[in-house]
Amino acid sequence: MPDFISLGISESTVNKLKEFGVAKPTPIQERAIPFVIGGRDVIAQAQTGTGKTFAFILPILEKINPLASHVQALIVTPTRELALQITEEFEKLTKNIDGVDVLAVYGGQDVEKQLKKLKKNVQIVVGTPGRLLDHIRRGTVNLSEASLLVLDEADQMLHIGFLNEVEDIIRETPKTRQTMLFSATMPEEIRTLANKHMRKPEYIQVEKTQGPAANVKLIAIHTIDRAKQATLIQLVETHRPYLAVIFCRTKRRVSKLYEVLRSHKFLCDELHGDLSQAKREQVMKRFRDGDIQLLIATDVAARGLDVEGVTHVFNYDIPQDAESFVHRIGRTGRAGTKGLAITFYSSDDRPTLDMIEKELNITIQKQNLDNSEGKQDNKAGSAQTSVKKGYSNKNRGNDRKTELKNDGGNARTRKQREGTPKGTKAGSVKGKRPNVRPGDKRRTQSDSSKSRRMT
């Protein structure tokens, strides 16, 4: 396998990557970087978690001119969370490079603050379509000299309804620009967009089957809607996830489930589109820092949310298509680590589950917890009782905060403190929490490498 230097990345950047534990390129990086550095338009089809962000960040940094004061590179993303994550990766790599400034432009943020930074001659802009168009109409973002354009998660921008806005933005850039399009799937509308705005693009596809990663165990549990809350509580108590994302169909259902889990003393918070941007950023920071264990979210969190240590995904409401299923499941099992994804389904949901299995060519293990209409009330009482006895959630939360503030300790001490049986592997999704914590500042180099290769 070639290294980053052989792909055309400078030695100074490679050394910075090594500091972050990134030593070898992933397949999408290996194939895309040489074409981008060579000036070719690129269409890259790769699912989440394959490392496509660095596939365009690294060559862009090689092509940026720090002495030029105009916007040279524009990255368009469907969500604010993804815009922030991409911006953070750019900032890590440009920390000690004079003259290269990066700005995230997205809705919900103070416009005056963005305007102030734009006056400092920003070379790289990362933004969402709506706010980018706002700045273009204000005359505060000038893309007339932009030479690099990236459309990231293009299919999600189509799904959200941003396709017209994206085309308006493309028209603001020179026809001589270099264009890169990254997408997990390639619907007809995206192909049309590419044919219209790209020049003989190089097509790269890393995985032909857009299915969940093989290292993620898939389980489907039959239940009814009235029994879902008790079932979820029972499963969280049984599996004790280190960090978990719980997906609900609507913002209302997210908030309702959040109140229930909070009343049971779980460390949790909610994430959906009705929250202010400041609140959303605060929630994500708490989740990354390990201050909360369960993140209850709508599909707004399914794209681009890359958090170390997510061991479980719960589909509280079944996703409506195979694509959404893949991207929800992609929140766990990152960088080759093991994960567990549990999907709740009712009898009415069975056709949707069958469709997902058929489209992805997978078989999901089915389980029935006997949550029938007549027995669910007893099941709920049983689950709530299990929460209160033994090692309570409240005590567990306090212990967790204390441990995360610790300087890392050693694995044996933590194992004894948590009562993990001998022979239990760190990162195991069953039993006690894993010994390697996403909040630890003193992970080994190998751990860091595994967790960050996929950026």
Image (spheres, grey):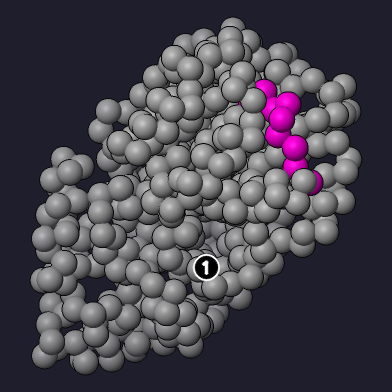
Left or right: where does residue 74 sit relative to residue 210?
Answer: right
Residue 384 in picture, x, y percent from top left: 35, 87
Q: Nearer the viewer, residue 233 or 328?
A: 328
- Please name the predominant secondary structure of the magenta segment in the image: loop
Bounds of the magenta segment: 140-148
The quarter of the image holding the C terminus is: top right
Return the x and y of residue 446 as percentages of the image width and height. 56, 32
Residue 59 in view in this figure: yes
Q: How many marks?
A: 1
Q: Which residue is rendered at x = 64% and y = 35% of the image?
A: 172
Residue 54 location in percent, x, y?
58, 29
Q: Is residue 455 above or below residue 176?
A: below
Q: Is residue 413 found left or right of 314 in the rendered image?
A: right
Quarter-of-image position of residue 337: top left
314 magenta-colored:
no
Q: Is residue 209 above or below residue 281?
A: above
Q: Nearer the viewer, residue 396 or 245?
A: 245
Label 1 Cα crowd, 10 Å radius (few <14 / some 14-19 / many 20+):
some
The residue drawn where x is 52% and y is 10% is 2
Q: Amino acid at mark 1?
A: Gly
* Residue drawn at point x = 53 percent, y = 47 percent: 165
Q: Which residue is mark 1?
A: 273
Q: Is residue 366 left or right of residue 34?
A: left
Residue 145 lies in the magenta stretch: yes
Is residue 315 depicted above or below 383 in this figure?
above
